[in-house]
Structures are given as C-alpha cells and as structure tokens.
Image (tube, helix red, strand yellow):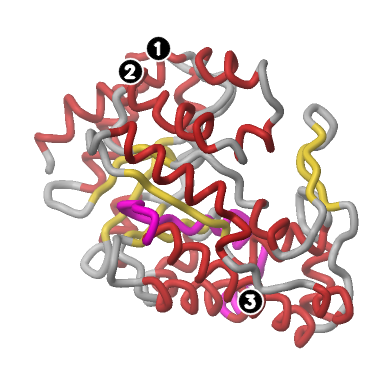
Amino acid sequence: MRQAGRYLPEYRAVRRKVDFLTLCKTPDLAAEVTIQPVDRVGVDAAILFSDILVVPEAMGMELSIEEGKGGPRFRVPVRSSEDIARLRVADPSALQFVLDAVRVTQRNLRRRVPLIGFSGSPWTLAAYMVEGAGSGDFRRAKSLLYTHPRVMHGLLEKVSDTVSAYLASQIEAGVDALQIFDTWGGVLCHDEFVEFSLRYMERVVQAIRGSVPVIVFSKDGGGVLREIASIGADVVGLDWKTDIGEARAAIGNRVALQGNLDPVMLLSTPARIEEGVRAILAKFGKGEGHVFNLGHGVLPETPVENALAFVEAVKKFSPEYH
C-alpha cells in the first residue's frame, strides 16, 4: 500500500524536479516511481503511482495540492444538489494519463511482477468532494448524509459510475489486479456504512469483477468484515487494528485476506520487524489466501533498510505457513 513515496531517495530525487500532480499526470515519471520499490526493496507486486483525487477532478472539480499547507483541496466543494448536477460522469479518456502510465509501467516491468491499479471508494471520494479537503471526522460530508440523504445518494451514484468505468479502463490498459481504497469508511456508523459506503463499493465490484482479482480495503473496517466479504471482491484488506486470525475465522473461507503489519513498526528495528511478521503469519496460520502487507501505507520517515527488512522477513518466514 502506497509503496512509492518520500521514504525512497529515488522518489525524492524525482519530486525535486516536478510537483505532485505533474508527477501523477506524466506517464513516464509515474511509471518510473511505480517501479522504484520493485527494484529497491523487492516487493512481489507494483502499485500504480497515482492519486485517488484525480477522479473528482475528471468529474469537473478544481483540484490543487498545497504541499506543506494541508495537502489536497477542491476550490469549490460539492454542497448541494445543484453542485452535483454540474458534475459529469467522467469518461475514462479524461484520465488518459493514468491509462498511459499503466501501459508504460507494464512495458518497463517486463512482467517481472504483477501491477495493481486502484481507485478510492465512492464514499471516500464523495467525502473529500463535500468536505473540500482532508478532515479528521468529515463532519460536513456526514452532515449532508444525515440531513439530505437523497442528495448524498445522488452524488454517490455519479461517483460510482465514474469509478466503475475508470477501473474497467485500467483493466483494459493492462493492470493485473485492482484495489478499492475505502479510506474513510471507518468514520461512519454501521448502518450508514452499509447504506452509503458498502452499497456503492458493491456496485463497483459487480461492474468490474471477473477479469482481474479485486481487493477491497476499508480502514477501520474490522467491525464490518462479514459485510465487506459479501460484496463479491476476491480479497479483503485489513488495517493493523484487526486480528488477522480472527478475520480468517470469520471470513477467510470466502475471500483471501491482505495485511496487516502496523506501518509504525517499520520505524523500529529489523529484529522487531521480524517478530511482527512472524506473529502475523502465526495468527493467520497454515494455508493459502494471505497477501502479506502493511495495515496502511508506508510512512514517509520509514528507513529504506527497514522496508527491505520487512520484505525479506516475509519472504523468509512465509513458506513455513503458505
């Protein structure tokens, strides 16, 4: 999850030359930073370098990223049915730079490892679109959901149609698997999660399933794993707060599991990282259906040698179980 980034000196060297959105929208550069973790730390798959918020931008919103000043934001957030009416269901051609990055990456990877494409979930994208920027609790988005649920459903329908077409186009461009990031599903209560997040993730999954494996990751989703496992995805991602042994007992006969070392553990020592890897392998137990991963993205301050120690530990100890 989020393999490329500031922890890699090779990535920082590229970023000194271009701003973040330019990097996302330049296929050769996006392919370069996508492949950097494969070359540097030896991961078993590459994750396409992009950003989830290019989707709302393609729908007609004005996106800017103020680095060091709060991150991405939309100049005019979506706050009413009139705002939603102005949005378009984006044709994948509006995101051609992503599709070109897929093709360039696959050409340069030469099939050494699979390539994973992705999108934010409809709810997560809608939350940013209403809030206008990142937030701890997304109170504006939740307020719209509670006060005007039909308006929120209208937004989610448009976003879902855009995401479905976008992911289908990534399959056509050549990705080997897809991941849906429901980063902010965990801010919702159970019933609201089912109605406003899960329902639309299922809609997307059903639109794209069958061609490549589909992974669904909902941060803070440990309490709704059975529901997530029911929507048709092949893999359910787990954050670091979920016990993978309990998750396997609950849903592991229906889907594969992905996860779930705490990313902060990569700030410790190689010996402690090995312990953490072995503990998760032991909790999952013997058998198939485990994609070992972090429970969220690599932190920028992670030492490269610790990321490498993590990957090496997984490769060293997992054959005993899998």
In the foreground, 158 or 122:
158
Residue 239 locus on image (x, y percent):
47, 48
Query: Which contiguous range is marked in magenta?
Result: 172-194
Q: Is residue 104 left or right of residue 51?
A: left
Q: Is residue 208 above or below residue 242?
A: below
Q: Which residue is identified by label 1?
A: 305
Q: What's the residue at 83%, 55% (across, down)?
A: 132
**Is residue 236 in the magenta section?**
no
Image height check: is 11 above or below 86? above
Q: Quadrant of residue 163?
A: bottom right
For the residues labelled 3 and 1, the Cα–Cα distance comes to 41 Å
Q: Which residue is mark 2?
A: 309
x then y, percent, for residue 99: 48, 51
Q: Quadrant of residue 306?
A: top left
Q: Residue furthest left?
A: 320
Mark closer to the chain start, 3 or 2 = 3
Q: In the figure, is residue 13 to the left or right of 59?
A: left
Q: Secondary structure at mark 2?
A: helix
At 48% from the left and 59% from the top, the residue drawn is: 180
Front position in the image: 261 or 20: 20
Q: Residues within 10 Å of mark 3 (few under 14, many from 20)?
A: some
Q: Amino acid at mark 2?
A: Ala
Tag shown at residue 196: 3
Separation of marks 3 and 2 at Cα, in angstroms: 39 Å
